[in-house]
Amino acid sequence: MNTREMFKRAVAGGYAIPAFNFNTMEQMQAIVQAAVETKSPVIMQVSKGARNYANATILRYMAEGAVAYAKELGCEHPEIVLHLDHGDSFELCKDCIDMGFSSVMYDGSSLPYEENIRISRQVVEYAHKYDVTVECELGVLAGVEDEVVAEESHYTKPEEVIDFATRTGCDSLAISIGTSHGAYKFKPEQCTRDPKTGKLVPPPLAFDVLAEIEKKLPGFPIVLHGSSSVPQDEVDTINKFGGNLPDAVGIPEEQLRKASKSAVCKINIDSDSRLAMTAAIRQYLAEHPDHFDPRQYLKPARENMKKMYIHKIVNVLGSDGKLAQC
Ligand code: G3H
Ligand code: 13P
Ligand code: ZN
């Protein structure tokens, strides 16, 4: 299904839909199990990097398998969106739409304003012919990943959002209010240190900018990227069993909880899944040096990701029990 009705209900109900990235079968299984057990709608998203890693056709059929798997697990009416994350060209978006994606993001946030509008509009016109919903982005998130690179963030300008949403015709808008991609969302000098634990405390999100945007576009679906919380217990496990992630820091969950109650109706989480998977695998292999069957270490990795997804759904985004029909 596309995101239209899902977002309408989320905005009205004061919760957010989880958008979890997947690249592997274990991530897909953990996402579906978590969504079914909590009776939550879910967006399964695929980046350009995921398509390069796993193969676009395989991921598309895995998503179709996810719907069948949810039904097999006892959920008669699952609500699962297959979404392209950070599409960087009209051609990539078109390819996903032609393949059967129900939602795409065109990310022209690094382009000049008029160019972002022009290509966003082109994607929206094509997508809407097939009832595919489109997320566009205004404002720049900091962070460095395979396909998403920006040194500095620039908050979304509230004075631009009406013009942008109207001229592009987009169905949802990703904004920049201080989140960023990856496990190092803030430099230590941007944070304070908790004197008791010595851990970094990040600066708060720009809720004033979010409020201004909501005032300009009442009820319009807003999306937050870069919303992993970088759980310290997972970072500590990784570091204890041979990893090296000093001063990794994410977005505090209370802030995401607060954002979920506003017009923010989609929250993107990828790095936390990577951390949960890596922590479980590192611990398992360190404790079982004689094991070499991938199923042995991928099983606890899948369990750990599932636990994290359920926690986000229930305690952070509040999308549990929100299926239209069970
Ligand atoms: O925002 C980007 C997602 O975390 C996907 O990252 O491009 O490394 O797959 P990726
Ligand atoms: P994180 O790196 O914070 O998980 O953000 C993921 C994201 O925004 C995917 O588009
Ligand atoms: Zn993102």
Image: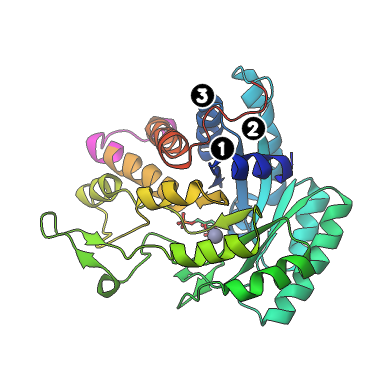
Residue type marked 2: Ala
Asked if disc 2 and disc 3 are in contact, CB closer than 8 Å, the reply is no
The correct choice, above or below, for 276 with respect to 209 in the image is: above
Q: Does residue 219 appear anywhere in the picture? A: yes
Q: Is residue 288 highlighted in magenta?
A: yes
Residue 28: x and y in percent read 56, 37
Q: Can you give x and y, in whole percent of width and height, for residue 239 in the image?
A: 23, 52
Whole-number angstrom distance, CA of label 1 to CA of label 3: 14 Å
The residue labelled by disc 3 is 37
Query: Measuring 71% from the left and 35% from the top, which residue is drawn there?
Result: 64
Q: Is residue 45 left or right of residue 179?
A: right
Query: Where does label 2 land, which residue?
Result: 66
Q: Which residues are magenta?
A: 284-295
Secondary structure beneath disc 2?
helix
Q: Look at 67% across and 82% down and name the residue there.
A: 112
Position of the N terminus, as image quadrant, is top right
Mark 1 secondary-structure assignment: helix
Q: Residues within 10 Å of mark 3 (few under 14, many from 20)?
A: some
- Measured as percent of width and height from the top left, residue 147 is found at 57, 67
> Does 22 sit left or right of 311 as displayed?
right
Q: Which residue is mark 1?
A: 28
Task: Give whichever of discs 2 and 3 has the lower sequence position.
Answer: 3
- Residue 63 or 211: which is nearer the viewer? 211
**Circle 3 SS class:** helix
Task: Give the number of callouts.
Answer: 3
Mark 2 surroundings within 10 Å by alpha-carbon count, few (fewer than 14), some (14 through 19), many (20 or more):
many
Residue 5 place in picture, x, y as percent: 72, 40
Q: Residue at x 29, y 73 (%)?
A: 190
**Pointer 1 or 3: first along the chain:** 1
What amino acid is found at the position of numbered circle 1 in the picture?
A: Met
Q: Is residue 268 depicted above or below 170 in this figure?
A: above
